[in-house]
Image (cartoon, rainbow, N blue to C red):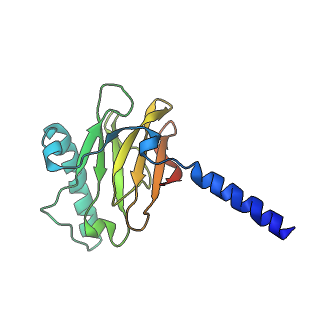
Amino acid sequence: MIREFLKKFLLLSLLLLSSCKSVAEHNYIYTLDFSLDRQRQFPDKRRVVDELNKGFKEELKSLGREFDKERNIPFDVFDLNDDGVEEIITKSVDAVICGNYDCGCSILLKQEKWNNVVDGMWCYDGDMYVLKSKTLGFYDMATKGLRRWKGKTRIWKWNGSKYEYSHYILEK
């Protein structure tokens, strides 16, 4: 009886693992580009991120921590809800912010002002993607892990007011 249970459990486990999709199979439409060349194309968005950066530096200083003044928070833009206004996606990459763990991201949505519409989105040290799929009118997002989260890609979906973690997929 235990042997039969183990066989069924093993078969089910293999079936579930084989059904996992990679990010490529998840049909992404854009890989976020946090390069300086890309950022230079959006000076108006750079000003918004710099204001966010300024407030963040002041908050860190009040906690007795220093932030590398020469390093800006990298960002990219993408219209996540097809309203004609590109949202700003930031990726924190400074050791003061990330420590030994993964770095956080922000997704800034222009409402009356720029608002962060994600809680606890970890960018890992890998790529970020905009997926073809949508939830409630917003494109789904994916964050791919390398070091500690190697082989796992987290999927983030819009819940009507913010992006939240949905599930992860294992890379084949």
| Above/below status of 85 relative to 47 | above
| Above/below status of 167 relative to 79 | below
Q: Is residue 130 left or right of residue 165?
A: left
Residue drawn at the location 24% of the way across and 48% of the way down: 75
Q: Nearer the viewer, residue 2 or 42?
A: 2
Residue with the most extreme right position = 1
Q: Position of residue 143 (x, y in %)?
A: 40, 51
Residue 124: image quadrant is: bottom left
Residue drawn at the location 48% of the way across and 47% of the way down: 155
Residue 42: image quadrant is: top left
| Above/below status of 118 relative to 86 | below
Can you see residue 47? no
Q: Position of residue 35 (x, y in %)?
A: 19, 49
Q: Is residue 62 left or right of residue 138?
A: left
Q: Position of residue 100 (x, y in %)?
A: 35, 73
Q: Quadrant of the N terminus?
A: bottom right
Residue 139: image quadrant is: top left
Q: Nearer the viewer, residue 89 or 161?
A: 89
